[in-house]
């Protein structure tokens, strides 16, 4: 009986943790600020405690709900009152400005020079003289504005107007036709079979992946054991 109770409590812990995570919202690890990071660890620890607590599982449950509720409340406050973000999340700090290191700001964010240089190299800046401004964001990420002469050239710089790329939709995956996606694109099996014939493919089962955009640009990757690497063919 106790084993069954333990299983049920563990499942309940997983369910509550899932609901709390949904309420808090989805963020990548790199987007979490310090408070979100600590809260996430704490909620996870409480959920683990609840999963093994047979006597009073409601205690860690209440703690989990309180932590989740406070985190959600702070999120609502920062959205409705932008000025509160300065006190709850912190503010960005300039670490390098016009080629000059701001040593006092480095000390303020508790970042030493070696850590700063590692963060620069991670973004491809091995030469600090190519950096115009470096900003340490409140989520612990470094944002860099390069010197204009060092940044990559854009089509606008070259007076070129490239065609806007569109999102591709999967029509065939692992040899299986995704009919819902096909209908969403306003296409049908007749059109798809015609495309396969044009690419000299006998059956959808011979295709690993086939995608298409709104301009009917069709790309497929064949499933052919005699070819070591996948080959892509495109409509002209």
Image (cartoon, rainbow, N blue to C red):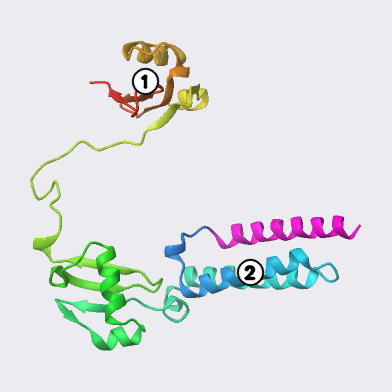
Q: Which residues are magenta?
A: 1-25
Task: Reply yes or no: does residue 22 show up in magenta.
Answer: yes
Which quadrant is home to the N terminus? bottom right
Instruction: Name which quarter of the figure residue 195 lies in.
Output: top left
In this picture, is 202 found above or below 61?
A: above
Task: Reply yes or no: does residue 223 show up in magenta.
Answer: no
Q: In the figure, is residue 184 to the left or right of 218?
A: right
Circle 1 Cα neighbour tier, 10 Å, few/some/many (<14 / 14–19 / ≥20): few
Which residue is tagged 1? Answer: 226
**Which mark, by number, is residue 142?**
none
Which residue is tagged 2? Answer: 43
Q: Secondary structure at mark 2?
A: helix
Q: In the figure, is residue 232 to the left or right of 9?
A: left
Circle 2 Cα neighbour tier, 10 Å, few/some/many (<14 / 14–19 / ≥20): many
- Main SS type for the magenta part? helix
**Location of residue 73 in the rendering, given as x and y in whole percent from the top left corner:** 58, 71
**Location of residue 155 in the rendering, given as x and y in whole percent from the top left corner:** 14, 46
For the question of whether residue 119 can be seen, the reply is yes
């Amino acid at each position: 009986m106790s084993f069954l109770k333990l299983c049920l409590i563990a499942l309940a812990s997983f369910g509550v943790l899932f609901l709390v995570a949904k309420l808090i919202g989805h963020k990548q690890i790199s987007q979490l600020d310090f408070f979100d990071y600590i809260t996430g660890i704490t909620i996870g620890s409480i959920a683990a405690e609840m999963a093994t607590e047979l006597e009073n599982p409601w205690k860690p449950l209440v703690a989990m709900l309180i932590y989740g509720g406070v985190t959600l409340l702070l999120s609502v406050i920062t959205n409705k009152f932008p000025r509160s973000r300065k006190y709850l999340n912190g503010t960005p700090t300039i670490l390098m400005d016009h080629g000059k290191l701001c040593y006092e700001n480095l000390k303020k964010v508790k970042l030493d020079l070696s850590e700063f240089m590692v963060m620069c190299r991670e973004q491809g800046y091995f030469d600090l003289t190519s950096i115009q401004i470096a900003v340490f964001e409140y989520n612990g990420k470094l944002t860099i504005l390069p010197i204009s002469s060092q940044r990559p050239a854009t089509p606008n710089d070259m007076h070129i107007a490239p065609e806007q790329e569109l999102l591709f939709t999967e029509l065939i995956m692992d040899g299986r036709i995704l009919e819902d996606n096909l209908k969403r694109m306003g296409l049908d099996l007749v059109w798809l079979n015609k495309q396969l014939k044009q690419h000299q493919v006998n059956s959808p089962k011979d295709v690993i992946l086939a995608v298409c955009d709104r301009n009917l640009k069709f790309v497929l990757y064949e499933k052919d054991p005699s070819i070591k690497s996948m080959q892509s063919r495109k409509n002209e």
